[in-house]
Image: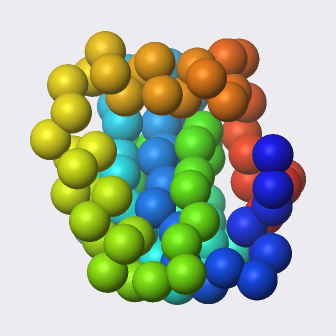
Amino acid sequence: METATDITPFATYILTNHKKSVLYIGVTNDLKRRMTEHKSQFDPCAFTAKYNVNRLVYFEKFQSVNDAIAREKQLKHWNREWKERLINTVNPNWNDLFVNV
C-alpha cells in the first residue's frame, strides 16, 4: 500500500473506533495533519471525539479535490456491509494505518 505522504495531496479516508462499531468518512488535503487532529481530539465537540473515532482503517489518494470529495460522497451513500468489504480488501485486520501516513 502506498503511503499518504506520496505526491498526491488529497485523501478520502475511513476511521473507526476501538470496538469497530462506528465508521466515519472524511476528506482532507493533509492526511497526516488531519489524523493528528482526530487522535488528539482537537475539537472535543466533534463527532470523532465524542465517539473516540481515531483509527485510520482505509484511505485513497487523489490528485483532484473534486475527485476526493466525489469519492467521499459516494462512500457515505454505501451501506455498512459494502464499506466493510472495501476496508477488508486492503486491511483485513483493521489495523490503524496511521503508521503509514
Determine if residue 44 is in view. Answer: no
Q: Is residue 65 above or below residue 5?
A: below
Looking at this view, is 100 or 72 the one in front? 72
Query: Where's residue 49, x and y in %?
Result: 40, 56
Residue at left 35%, top 46%? 24
Looking at this view, is 75 or 38 the one in front? 75
Residue at left 21%, top 57%? 73
Quarter of the image where one finds residue 36: bottom right
Residue at left 68%, top 27%? 91
Query: Where's residue 100, x and y in %?
Result: 83, 55
Q: Is residue 85 above or below residue 56?
A: above
Query: Where's residue 85, x and y in %?
Result: 46, 18
Determine if residue 5 is in view. Answer: yes
Residue at left 26%, top 65%? 70
Please give left or right for residue 23 compared with residue 19 in the image.
Answer: left
Quarter of the image where one finds residue 67: bottom left
> Which image quarter is the C terminus in?
bottom right
Looking at this view, is 2 or 27 the one in front? 2
Please give left or right for residue 21 compared with residue 35 in the image.
Answer: left
Q: Is residue 27 above or below residue 78?
A: below
Looking at this view, is 7 or 59 the one in front? 7
